[in-house]
Amino acid sequence: MKKLEEYVVTIPDFPEPGIMFRDITSVIQDPDGLKLAVDGLTDLVKDLDFDLVVGPESRGFIFGVPVAYNLGKGFIPVRKKGKLPRETVRVKYDLEYGQAEVEIHKDAIRPGEKVVIVDDLIATGGSAEAAAKLVEQLGGEVVRMVFVMELAGLEGRKKLGKYDVESLIVYPGK
């Protein structure tokens, strides 16, 4: 079986010149790539004491649900504003060009519950930090954040400095 990195297709100059786009769809479309990613993420959290997996929309769902299933944990979605049907709490965060707002059901996490955040990519760290703030607003504790890929050149790990962060693949650039 190939290494996980070998399933990632890199597209130069997308969406603009100088960017090396790392395509996660090439990982999940291949059964072996998907298995390597999910098993790798599961391995990064299996020995932790935690109660729930939280995954930001939408690729956090793809990877978070099977990790939760593998470990017998519940899964909590973080969604874009207006997508959840019950009472929510929300937080705004900065994007490269503007802001976004995400939310979580107000009753999704009880005070003292320990949470792992799972997502596909850490770039600037904005969406992961927003997910962590939602967990903390509800009284939960983020015990680790895990990602399939990390773009180290965008320094998202710095923004998440107070959290335990692990990535399966780390790319040095942007």
Image: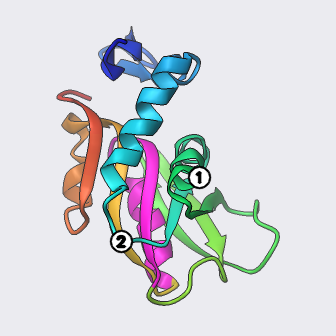
Query: In the rendered view of the protein, which quadrant contains the C terminus?
Result: top left
Numbered disc 1: secondary structure: helix
Distance of label 2 from label 1 (alpha carbons): 16 Å
Q: Are marks 2 and 1 in contact (CB under 8 Å)?
A: no
Residue 47 relative to residue 138: left or right: left
Residue at the spot x=63%, y=60% of the render?
77
**Percent of width and height locating residue 38:** 47, 37
- Position of residue 35 relative to residue 29, above or below, is below
Residue at the spot x=43%, y=32% of the render?
37
Q: Which residue is mark 2?
A: 49
Q: Which residues are magenta?
A: 113-137
Q: How is the image coloured?
A: rainbow
Q: Which residue is mark 1?
A: 69
130 part of magenta stretch = yes
Residue at the spot x=75%, y=80% of the render?
87
**Percent of width and height locating residue 138:** 52, 84
Q: Which mark is residue 167?
A: none
- Crowding around mark 1 (Cα neighbors within 10 Å: few <14, some 14 to 19, many 20+) is few
**Percent of width and height locating residue 127:** 45, 54
Numbered disc 2: secondary structure: loop
Residue 25 relative to residue 20: left or right: right
Q: Earlier in the sequence, mark 2 or mark 1?
A: 2
Would you identify the image quadrant in which residue 68 lies?
Answer: bottom right
